[in-house]
Image (cartoon, coloured by chain):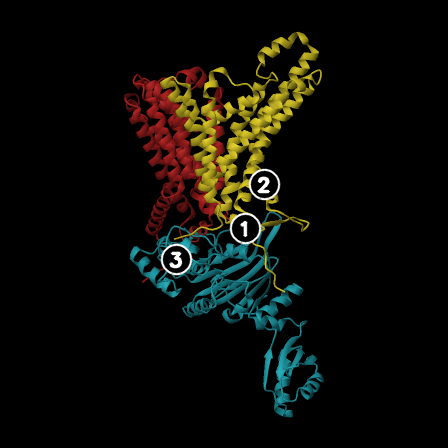
Chain colours: A yellow, B red, C cyan
């Protein structure tokens, strides 16, 4: 006997045939996207490059702890030389910012795999032919990108934070520096959100690797270069706001409670720039998430 | 009406090769790459205009602030990559290479046509960007505009040869090319010692320093001769010419041998 | 072993002991055949090696062992391509171009002068039924239209050998008839056509000769009927209509050629026949000498599909 389906239900069927809300589709979309990226050998190479800095810092923290035990007399000298590795918020902020540089490269390459191919090879039609909406697809893809960002920034930072604390004499480090944990999570969330929105928008419009990377380079290399030149010309640090990456870093500093004094006046501007760019990326992404394209 | 095409004469081959180059050039200039190159040029123009707002600049500052870090190390390889990397790899990826390989054109001619199209497109941008940048930079830039033109030519030739070779040899040529640009050129090209000689931009800068010596462009700062170890102009020129020819021939050889499936 | 006797002088294509492997996978395993004028079908299940065989023939890959020749030249060489027209199975074009422009450019690349290319383009587009629709961008074409353009570019330089990889894919039934008629016209102009297809029923009407491929090996070559004849262990199924089916069945069962008989609800008599040559001589004798009336008979499983099924089941080399 024929049966009318309720068109408005938008149910997503889980593996055990229980009907689940469509929001549950976000996770498999995200994990599938992440696996697509991780399956490529080249991305393992890039991931390896992103972890060089992490390994260096990991070894340095261990070395400092070891010297503190074996040769306390040298501790002050080592602290002077390696003052960037001090277990403070600045250490982790700088580490995450440095990781972010190579992460951006990895994302530029990954944009084609994660998003561009859905447009070029018609994969988007398969997603949207399921009982999910555009928002679920969009959120799934954003989550996939965010996972990759977290893999190379937040997760290594957390490992370093735990390592630093474990190599101190007691758990007092964790009690006194709980804010650093929040800072890592906050900065990581900010980076993941901003980069995923911008990457999705650019990949949805440009699709192929070369235009995508060039567009990425314009935003993260050339625009900051223009900002740096204008800052020198006009002797005004406000021009640094042109650097989107720098603005994210400034907000990240706020998460760690470590905003440099000279950059404090730029905070409202940084918030505005990041918010505007993210909003523009989201608005640019929404019309691109369609299952069909009309060819005239 | 139709000639016996089993005797595909040399004139017909050359004509086919030129036609393929023309078609490839037209397609490549109409692609998204051109849009993005335009965007890159727009940002560069912005940077140069901002830089030139102070009127007391000289050619040395132009070279140190714009030419070496922005143009030679970034724009030159990027413009070349935009058109050279997808030349063969793009057709292979889009599965249209099969039509070209089914024609009676010898493989080396197909590659030469693709190389020619990429070279012309890249040169349009590298020369265009150079002309615009150095003109907008004012007297500081116009002073060196003509002197650096041969350097732009040879460097573009090398980069296009290199990336066309990648395109013929590697499945993900664009990505490998980008890794090369961002790591070998940007990273290795600035390390101490002779490791920087792995980067083409080192030879570009050596040639520029040589050409600009009489125009007031000297190796200073990070390009101090003790740190940078630039090569003499003749040596750098010889190496660049050799690289240009070698990369082209490597591309020809590879494309002629490789099975594209 | 081929069922047709061909001389190497007359053959346009020569596959001599060709094997091709990709790493540990043997895609084509010691295949030998020759092709002459006419339509040859290439059939086989997925993964049989058809695509690899076609790639070897069109010079996209080189054989690991053996030789692939077109008109005496290696298929890899550029000179061999001038005698070859190839319609690939990939659905890819220069999408921004019109069909007309695409075909014209390929005509020029094949060595036609500008005027000849224009003229020939119109002729070929007319022949494939795209003359009035070829000015739109290729990205707007339906699957069938794209197939026709692919075919047009394969025919543009009037090659002697035409290799068609799934040419009727996506073409509507009327279009299939039109293209089939085109293929026969081409054969009449002394062309050799190799068609790879999964639609085995089409091969019955189209192909003079079939190459049956399985797991990289050539199982059989010849017309379906000829190959069928060689499959001695599979009895041929023949349906006979007669006013007296039971008597006829009893009479035929007494012979050595008929292994089994079944009277069908519709009145037909379904026979399992060994040694078809003997059976038909016998049947002729029975009809003429003993007065049995036979209204009609039909050989059921000499079609390409049936032969293919038998060959796949047994994996025999014939």
- Residue found 70% across the figure and 81% down from its top: C256
Q: Is residue B228 above or below residue C26?
A: above
Could you say where residue B60 lies in the image, as x and y percent from the top left? 34, 18
Chain of the residue under the numbered disc 1 shown in the image? A
Could you say where residue A15 lies in the image, as x and y percent from the top left? 66, 49
Q: Is residue A175 above or below residue A28?
A: above
Q: Which of these two is toward me, C90 or A3?
A: A3
Q: Secondary structure at mark 2?
A: helix
Image check: A24 left or right of A122?
right
Could you say where residue A292 lies in the image, as x and y percent from the top left? 47, 51
Chain of the residue under the numbered disc 2 shown in the image? A
Residue identifier under label 3 = B6
Residue identifier under label 1 = A126
Q: Secondary structure at mark 3?
A: loop
| Residue B235 seen in the figure | no
- Residue found 31% across the figure and 30% down from its top: B132
Q: Residues within 10 Å of mark 2 (few under 14, many from 20)?
A: many
Q: Which mark is residue A30?
A: 2
C-alpha gap between disc 1 and disc 3? 47 Å
- Residue found 50% across the figure and 44% down from its top: A117
Name which of mark 1 and mark 2 comes first in the sequence. Answer: 2
């Amino acid at each position: 006997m024929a049966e009318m389906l309720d068109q408005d239900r938008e149910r997503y069927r889980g593996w055990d045939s229980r009907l689940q809300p469509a929001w549950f589709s976000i996770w498999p979309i995200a994990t599938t996207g992440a696996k697509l990226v991780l399956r490529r050998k080249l991305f393992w190479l890039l991931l390896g490059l992103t972890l060089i800095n992490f390994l260096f810092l990991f070894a340095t923290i261990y070395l400092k702890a070891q010297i503190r035990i074996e040769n306390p007399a040298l501790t002050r000298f080592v602290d002077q030389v390696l003052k960037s590795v001090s277990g403070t918020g600045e250490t982790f902020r700088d580490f995450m910012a440095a990781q972010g540089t190579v992460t951006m490269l990895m994302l530029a390459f990954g944009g084609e795999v994660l998003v561009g191919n859905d447009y070029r090879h018609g994969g988007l039609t398969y997603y949207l032919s399921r009982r999910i909406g555009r928002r679920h697809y969009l959120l799934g893809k954003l989550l996939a990108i965010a996972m990759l960002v977290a893999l190379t920034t937040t997760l290594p930072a957390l490992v370093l934070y735990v390592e630093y604390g474990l190599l101190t004499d007691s758990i007092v480090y964790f009690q006194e520096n709980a804010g650093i944990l929040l800072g890592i999570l906050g900065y990581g969330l900010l980076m993941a959100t901003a980069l995923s929105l911008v990457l999705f928008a650019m990949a949805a419009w440009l699709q192929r690797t070369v235009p995508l990377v060039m567009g990425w380079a314009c935003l993260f290399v050339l625009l900051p270069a223009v900002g740096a030149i204008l800052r020198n010309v006009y002797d005004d640090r406000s021009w640094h706001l042109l650097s989107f990456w720098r603005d994210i870093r400034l907000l990240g500093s706020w998460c760690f409670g470590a905003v440099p004094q000279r950059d404090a006046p730029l905070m409202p501007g940084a918030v505005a720039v990041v918010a505007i760019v993210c909003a523009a990326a989201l608005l640019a992404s929404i019309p691109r998430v369609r299952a069909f394209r009309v060819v005239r | 009406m139709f000639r016996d095409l089993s005797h595909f004469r040399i004139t017909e081959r050359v004509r086919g090769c030129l036609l393929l180059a023309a078609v490839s050039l037209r397609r490549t200039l109409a692609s998204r790459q051109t849009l993005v190159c335009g965007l890159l040029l727009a940002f560069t123009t912005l940077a140069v205009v901002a830089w030139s707002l102070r009127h007391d600049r000289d050619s040395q500052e132009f070279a140190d602030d714009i030419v070496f870090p922005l143009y030679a190390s970034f724009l030159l390889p990027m413009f070349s990559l935009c058109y050279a990397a997808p030349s063969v790899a793009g057709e292979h990826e889009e599965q249209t290479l099969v039509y070209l390989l089914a024609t009676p054109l010898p493989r080396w001619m197909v590659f030469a046509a693709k190389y020619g199209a990429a070279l012309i497109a890249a040169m349009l941008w590298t020369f265009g960007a150079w002309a615009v940048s150095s003109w907008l930079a004012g007297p500081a830039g116009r002073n060196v505009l003509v002197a650096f033109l041969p350097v732009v030519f040879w460097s573009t030739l090398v980069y296009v040869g290199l990336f066309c070779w990648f395109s013929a040899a590697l499945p993900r040529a664009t990505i490998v090319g980008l890794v090369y640009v961002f790591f070998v050129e940007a990273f290795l090209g600035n390390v101490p010692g002779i490791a920087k000689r792995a980067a083409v931009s080192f030879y570009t800068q050596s040639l520029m320093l040589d050409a600009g010596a009489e125009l007031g462009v000297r190796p200073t700062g990070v390009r101090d001769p003790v740190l940078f170890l630039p090569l003499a102009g003749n040596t750098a020129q010889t190496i660049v010419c050799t690289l240009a020819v070698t990369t082209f021939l490597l591309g020809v050889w590879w494309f002629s041998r490789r099975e594209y499936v | 072993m081929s069922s047709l006797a061909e001389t190497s002088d007359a053959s346009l294509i020569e596959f001599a002991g060709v094997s091709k492997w990709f790493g540990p996978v043997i895609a084509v395993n010691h295949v030998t055949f020759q092709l002459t004028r006419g339509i040859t079908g290439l059939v086989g299940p997925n993964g049989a090696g058809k695509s690899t065989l076609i790639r070897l023939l069109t010079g996209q890959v080189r054989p690991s062992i053996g030789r692939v020749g077109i008109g005496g030249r290696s298929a890899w060489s550029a000179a061999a391509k001038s005698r070859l027209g190839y319609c690939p199975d990939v659905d890819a074009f220069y999408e921004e171009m019109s069909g007309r422009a695409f075909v014209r450019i390929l005509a020029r690349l094949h060595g036609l002068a500008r005027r000849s290319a224009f003229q020939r383009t119109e002729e070929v587009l007319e022949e494939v039924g795209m003359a009035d629709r070829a000015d739109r961008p290729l990205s707007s074409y339906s699957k069938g239209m794209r197939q026709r353009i692919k075919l047009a570019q394969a025919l543009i330089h009037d090659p002697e050998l035409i290799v068609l990889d799934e040419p009727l894919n996506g073409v509507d039934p009327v279009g299939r008839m039109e293209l089939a008629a085109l293929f026969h016209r081409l054969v009449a102009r002394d062309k050799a056509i190799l068609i790879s297809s999964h639609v085995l029923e089409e091969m019955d009407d189209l192909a003079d000769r079939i190459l049956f491929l399985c797991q990289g090996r050539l199982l059989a070559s010849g017309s379906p009927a000829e190959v069928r004849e060689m499959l001695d262990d599979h009895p041929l199924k023949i349906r006979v209509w007669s006013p007296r089916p039971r008597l006829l069945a009893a009479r035929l069962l007494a012979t050595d050629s008929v292994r089994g008989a079944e009277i069908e609800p519709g009145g037909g008599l379904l026979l399992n026949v060994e040694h078809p040559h003997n059976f038909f001589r016998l049947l002729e004798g029975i009809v003429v000498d003993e007065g049995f009336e036979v209204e009609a008979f039909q050989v059921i499983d000499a079609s390409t599909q049936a032969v293919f099924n038998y060959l796949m089941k047994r994996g025999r080399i014939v």
